[in-house]
Image: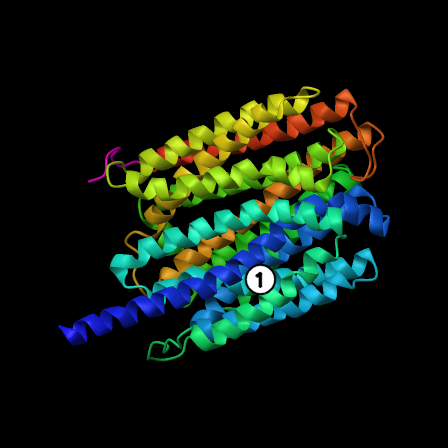
Amino acid sequence: MGVVAEDEREVRRRCRRALGVTTLGLMLVLVNATSLNLALPALSASFRVPAATADWFLVAFMLSNTASILVFSRISDMLGRRTIYLTGLACFTVISLLCAFAPNASTLIVLRVLQGIAAATTVTNTTAILTDVFPPDRLVHGLSLNITAASIAQMIGPALGGLLVTVADWRALFLVNVPIGILAVVLGSRLLPTIPRARGPRERFDVAGALLSSTGLAVLLFGINRIGPWGAADPRVPAAIVLGVALLVAFVLVERRISAPLLDLRLLQRPGRGQAYAAAFFNSFCRAGVVVLVGLHQQMVEHRTALEAGVVVMPLALVMMLCAPLSARLSLRWSARTLSSFGALLVVAGIVGLAGQLAVPGSPLLLMALCLGLIGAGTGLFTAPNTGSIMAGVGSDQRAVANGIRSMLFNSAQAAGTAVALLILTGWLGSSGVASYAANADDPAVRLGFAVAAITMGVAAFAGLVMSLARGGPWRAR
């Protein structure tokens, strides 16, 4: 009995250490990503660049991060998750320091590309490391705590970004990463266990798949983003979009024909899993766009500071954090289809209400907080059950791949949702004679532009609801 109790204590100790270290790294990346949303006006003014250029401070990070996830998922499986995780986290910290001293907009955009690539190692390996360390009967609990921490990071990010921009300047958003990153690397090197790789012949890395997937996604999102500044009639825009789609189609064809693909397409063949992946994509898409739109609306239209705008956005992540643990308890009685679909319905209702608030001058903050709270509650109820349905039935040798697909879709949706929301908004701003996010604009046409962009996010949320319902299965838990 004493040996069993000692083994149990050791298991718990390893789990706590892995959860603490990976949560710190994940929160560092997520806080950095969300805090910069409210710094666009400050960055635009500091570098004296138009809105279309300032967008790339956000889009460059998300684009490179998304394009790198599948690549590092495969590399981590081949070389070891711990090594890749710690190396990427150290690079992220160093690049953050360089970002703070960027002399011009072009340099900062290049550094954000590199920062996004480094962050991909954290996004890719967090869930995989927890799966390595946690016993199967405790994995769901560990992942739920990780999701809660991610929600906290999303809540802290905008508020911290607004605070630092208000009391200091945008450089503080990157400098604050340095001590936290150093701490995360030191703790990780001491506390994360080394998991031996599976024995057997070493598989070849899918170079063709890596190049096609990363390049195709980058080119596609580049084309979408350039519609605003270049115009849809510019031949470079459809050329980039068509080329990106063609590269992604070629990627799928290559993956179907090789024995060790970067993306195992067989994971999508299980009934309901493809719909769950699609539902997750649309949920992330609409939520990313909403956060950017509300933050900019509060500063440009309502003339609030970046700190005040961060506080306004906070209810979304706060309610999401509170509802995430609730979904775990409800899952004992209700199926993933029921909980995820009900959560998706709340997101649709919240975005529709929010669109109306963005179009009305002087809309009460209480109503806006209620709409954002609905979106947060819906996302909190949606995420854990939907993730569980994706991972259900996945063998231990494919969990990293399954999570890589989920992470890639999540980040693709974040990048696409932000790009589409800003694309629609910059189009309306341009027609109203507003060229920079640093400008104050309370023209009715500008308000309508914010509302139209929000409605577009609502359409994406409805698509997520349809996909969640389409997965099939029972309404009650079996």
**Nearest the eye: 37 or 274:** 37
For badge 1, the amino acid type reads: Ala
Q: Is residue 407 left or right of residue 67?
A: left
Can residue 204 be seen by looking at this rendering? no
Residue 415 against residue 477 in the figure, above or below: below
Q: Quadrant of the C terminus?
A: top left
Residue 369 against residue 257 in the figure, above or below: above
Relative image position of residue 111 (x, y in whole percent) = 71, 63
Residue 31 against residue 107 in the figure, above or below: above
The stretch in magenta equals 472-478
What's the residue at 60%, 37% (across, down)?
A: 313
**Nearest the eye: 131 or 282:** 131
| Quarter of the image where one finds residue 325 | top left
**Nearest the eye: 35 or 262:** 35
- Please identify the dominant SS of the magenta region: loop
Q: Label 1: how many residues lie within 10 Å, few (<14), some (14-19) or many (20+)?
A: many
